[in-house]
Image (tube, rainbow, N blue to C red):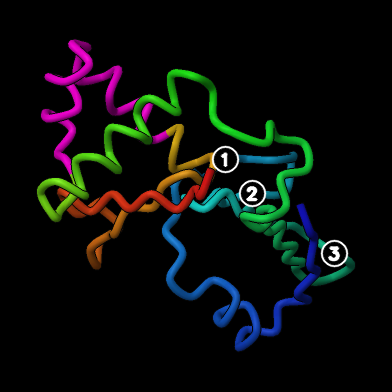
Amino acid sequence: MAEVEIGLDIAELSRQLEGLVVADLTQSGPDSIALRFTNAAVLVLGPKGGGLSAVLRNPPSRGDRSGARSGPTRRQQEYLEFIQRYIHRFGYSPAETDIERHFLVSAPSVNTMIRTLERRGFIERSRDWSGRTVPRSIRVVWDG
């Protein structure tokens, strides 16, 4: 992960965070907080001298998989192939209920797998103005 100390240049911070959706907010130290975004970037805010410091840790790019396995697991590959076949056949991505029926698994299992595929950079999903995922918006971005 590349780290960029922003020094609280509001314009630069705004540019770097544009379009990101906050996934989690945690306390990362006694005086600092960390905002984790859905794309795996992390913004850490904390005291520095008499002011405030902002450090943005960007996720690795799609081509850079250092620290991660190079490809999906066998089960993840099955999901990716099903999604690609479904899109090719119907012209739009499957709903999670379609995936649930195909693999004969529970809704939470499908949701967990989809979130894992997204976090690992194999798929992308569109989000609305409030950060919620748009139904049937899965796009496979892994080219393996």
Element on which disc 1 rests? strand
Q: Does the magenta stretch include residue 27?
A: no
Residue 63: % across, % down: 67, 55
The residue segment tinted magenta is 94-115
| Distance from Cα at disc 2 to Cα at disc 3 | 13 Å
Depicted 95 relative to depicted 123: above or below = above
For marks 3 and 1, give the CA distance: 19 Å
Residue 117 location, quadrant: top left
- Kindly identify the residue that appears in the image at 66 percent across and 58 percent down: 61
Type of the residue with mark 2: Ile
Instruction: Check contact, mark 2 vs mark 3: CB within 8 A.
Output: no
Question: Which residue is identified by label 1?
Answer: 26
Judged by its main secondary structure, the magenta piece is helix
Residue nearest the observer in this picture, 32 or 17:
17
User: Is 27 on the left or on the right of 97, as rendered?
Assistant: right
* Type of amino acid at the residue the image marks with label 1: Thr
* SS for callout 2: strand
In which quarter of the view is residue 81 placed?
top left
Which residue carries the number 3 mark? Answer: 48
Q: In this view, does 32 lie to the left or right of 23?
A: right
- Indicate whether 21 appears above or below 40: below
* Contact, mark 2 vs mark 1 (Cβ under 8 Å): yes
Asked if 58 appears above or below 105 in the picture, the reply is below
**Residue 140 horizontal/vertical position (percent):** 38, 49
Name the residue located 10 percent from the left edge and 49 percent from the top edge.
90
